[in-house]
Image (cartoon, rainbow, N blue to C red):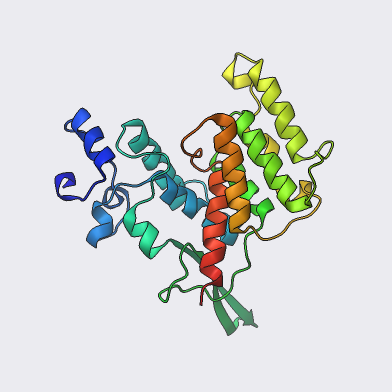
Amino acid sequence: MSQEQPRRPREEQQQQQQPGVEPIKYGDVFSVSGDLASKPIAPQDAAMLQSAEAAVLGQPQRGGPADTMRAAAAWNERAGLVGRGDVSEVAGKEGLTVERTITERVAGQVIGQFVEGASATGGAESQVTQQSAITIGEALEAAAQSAGDKPVDPSDAAAILVAEQRVTGSNVVIPGGLADSAQTAAAYNKGTRRDEAKIRISEVLTGATLKLPADRAANRHDAEWVMDAELRTGGKKAAHPGGVAASVAAAVRLNEGVASP
């Protein structure tokens, strides 16, 4: 049980504050065994898997494993059992992988088969055989899926602006572009009291790859700049789970995993 699991000091303190409350673990919602089954589902685990689903399947799958993990991680965070920036030790070391098997047939007979997928680590055990690097635009589209219901705030707008600037190489805000739309949304939301009337991230970032004037693979420097913008503008200690900075960071982790030998 949880008393046998190694925990960071902060997690131990939070558990003591809520005696008897157990986190939702992998073994509670998935048919898994070994060390993974006893580990709490962490927000960044869900964010990484959502980005991998988006890269391989086009978008995170509603009701799929990443969706289930996101709900479980959100419960764990609300209960004070994990932090929004936490990633489980097992997932961080051994990675997360999404695969799709493609079969080619002629007249009903198989002539070829290969696996396409994305892994967060890309180590020797990775089964990735075909995967393009995830672009900044695709990472923003992943954020539209994973944090789509979140109202746009200044920290989101700042992160989106930096992401757009990293793609264009210019500090000029493109009229009608992603950054312009995000800034308008953040200003509107600030003056709107009713939460249901606020503009959501999904309304700004859906179809981001088509709205950007250019696109390219996300790299570590992109992730650092976007993360800095989101944290600095919002005065936060951690990025919003599945949000703009988290999605770009997850894309970079996946890209580095694919590039690893």
Above or below for 206 versus 108: above
Examine the image and state in which quarter residue 129 appears. bottom right
Q: Residue at x 39, y 58 (%)?
A: 92
How many labels, in total? 0
Camera-nearest residue between 125 and 162:
162
Q: Residue at x 27, y 48 (%)?
A: 28
Q: Position of residue 257 (x, y in %)?
A: 51, 67
Q: Residue at x 70, y 33 (%)?
A: 182
Q: Position of residue 59 (x, y in %)?
A: 59, 52
Above or below for 200 versus 5: above
**Residue 212 in view, yes or no:** yes
**Residue 207 in view, yes or no:** no
Q: Residue at x 67, y 61 (%)?
A: 217
- From the viewer's perspective, is 100 left or right of 81? right
Camera-nearest residue between 261 and 208:
261
Camera-nearest residue between 85 and 112:
85
Above or below for 259 versus 156: below
Above or below for 260 versus 220: below
- From the viewer's perspective, is 230 left or right of 169? left
Camera-nearest residue between 161 and 60:
161
Q: Position of residue 40 (x, y in %)?
A: 30, 47
Examine the image and state in which quarter residue 17 appears. top left
Q: Position of residue 178 (x, y in %)?
A: 74, 40
